[in-house]
Amino acid sequence: MEEILSVKDLKKYFVKKGFTGNDKETIRVADGVSFSIKKSETFVLAGESGSGKTTIARIILGALEQDSGTITFSGQEITNHADSLKKIRLGCQMVHQDPYASINPRMTILDIVKESLEIHNIGNNEERNRIALQALSQVKLEPVEDIASKYPHMLSGGQRQRVAIARAIVTNPKLVIADEPVSMLDVSVRIGILELIKELQEKYGISFLYITHDLSTASYIGHRIAILYLGKIVETGPINEVLSTPHHPYTQALLDSIADPDPNNLHIDRKIRINESSGLVTYQGCRFMAKCPYAIEKCKQEPTLEKISDTRQVACFVKIN
Amino acid sequence: MTIMVALSVNDLVVQYQSQKKKVHAVDHISFSYKENESIGIAGESGCGKSTLGLAIMKTLQENASVSGEILLGDKSILSMSEPEFTKNIRWKQISMVFQGAMNSLDPVFTIKKQFEEILRKHNFEGDYKQTIESAILSVGLTHSILDKYPHEISGGMKQRVIIAMALVLKPKMVIADEPTTALDVLVQAQIMILLKKLKKDGLSIMLISHDLGIISEIAEKIGIMYAGQIVEFGNMQDIYKNPKHPYTIALLESIPKLGETKKIIPLKGNPPSLVNPPSGCRFYDRCPQAMEKCKKEPPKIKTASGFVMCWLHEQ
């Protein structure tokens, strides 16, 4: 299948300066991250806050510059050159986490959606209006004309997120990066947004990079998953396989921490298979070693992603299950 | 002094006056639960669940008007004067873990100073050091944390400190308003394990959350709130296994579960505004089973362990 996006050995370090400027601390938000997304696929990037998920998205869109590594978008390497940035910014759009902050409160819904058409000089004003209205109906904001003339404050959270999605698909992108698109929304409207993403994918063949910490919603819409821990991918593969038989202890701990609504939970003592750690982050050896209940002597060396089947890779010497 | 922690809320109404509008945040709510039970209040944002918690603690904003009755044992909380409530009830019998509490620690004081402030405010006359340390130990922290400033500790530790602060005067009941939101998944689970342990040690918890998953970890009783009303109330087992109200059913179904690939049909529409709530059933516009009758205010129908407000279950 055709590869839409391929990220190779991406590295980005942030340097945090102390109060005096002498004590510097380097934070590795992406440390050799590689993955690729195929056409019409939803690829999930999962991890805790601070694991580098959003930074990777920002690097892909050229909002941040990587320290090293390459990003190839539909066959062309993306560099800092204006033409190549334009290509990825047209073909790859983003949906942010917070629909209350990501759309401009002073613009009408129609202006918000057609803004990116204006930026990319697509069509004349009439055509732009037509395309924008079409995008609004694709995300099921009915009645379209009515919604188009409204301002964001007149819409609910779920409707706003639909506006953000309409804005993302209006340029007919090949890839949409969705950064926690449902975490700010109410439980009863979340599914509506997830179903919409699924439908847009089936109809128009859009690929999605779905960034989240919530494995339940991820498993609902994702095809493949990469688990990120402190800037490194620790496990990747088809989502059903990874979540049903995790091989990395961190994936297992994440799964342990999910509480499904089940009345039996009340009488069960829950256990998360993880050690309390000092909280200090070291970049030597396996990053998860301090918290890992299975750590062995060898873990002081750095594990690399190893193939364990045709589709799965894991970076662990122990390989549980 | 022996204390009955049984709490009962009768016909509680809370309205906020905002400019010329009246917001009906909590509308004729009644429920009760027994000593040593924990209760979960579930609902979406804006349904009035936090207001309910604040009303019990008597910490509502000034523009709120309250009517109805809240009984703690046989004492009526609402008719109590403010100094009397502070002296006898607040933090001594009921305390609260506020939403976003992690950010409520004062950045310029050490954790210890902030504990001492609570004790001083409540005219505590025992051994400060010992009381604070036992509270800190009960939430799984060590006393080395006391000399730290809030910025030196992680989000999960801050949340533990906040819970320890709620427990410092050994209340029998704690209201926890979204105690795990804004925390990482692993930390969330660890906080829930902590709450479970505290519950085992005899604490009665009122857990306010939108997450039915975490409520199922500790609550024997559960109330489902929608647009200012409790639409269904009962034993957790009954409600999760045999939900009666269409909203409860939709809410339970709308949570994707691991390993299930079943397609979920999303609920249409949005909750109504609480400024001018519609007459009749508030779920009418979104309900897949709405009928003509539902335009009238639904009755409270008794179920095995509680009640449901829905015409469908009329006998």
Image (cartoon, rainbow, N blue to C red):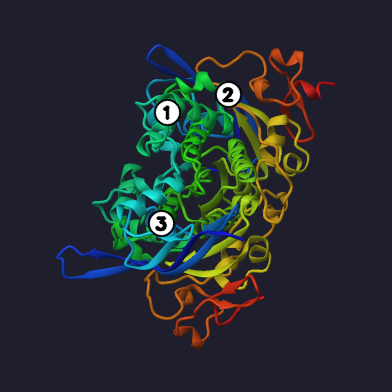
- For the point 67% across and 65% down, the residue is A241
Hey, which residue is sitting farthest left in the picture?
A20
What secondary structure is marked by label 2? loop
Q: Is residue A258 above or below residue A13?
A: above
Residue B59 visible in the shown view: no
Q: Residues within 10 Å of mark 2 (few under 14, many from 20)?
A: few
Hey, which quadrant is residue A248 in on the image? bottom right
| Secondary structure category for the residue under label 1 | loop
Q: Nearer the viewer, mark 1 or mark 2?
A: 2
Q: Are marks 1 and 2 in contact (CB under 8 Å)?
A: no
Q: Residue at x 67, y 55 (%)?
A: B258
Marker disc for residue A60: 3
Dot 3: few (<14), some (14–19), or many (≥20) neighbours within 10 Å?
many
Give the residue type that dot 3 points to. Answer: Ile
* Residue at the far right in the pictured view: B315
Q: Looking at the rendered structure, which numbered label has been put on residue A245?
A: none
Q: What residue is drawn where x is 60% and y is 78%?
A: A319
For mark 1, what is the residue?
Answer: B60
Q: Give the left or right position of residue B10, taking residue A27 as reference.
A: right
Q: Which residue is mark 2?
A: A142
Q: Amino acid under label 2?
A: Glu
Q: Position of residue A305 (x, y in %)?
A: 52, 76
What percent of the width, then of the height, locates residue A150?
A: 45, 21
Q: Nearer the viewer, mark 1 or mark 3?
A: 3
The quadrant of the picture occupied by the C terminus of chain B is top right
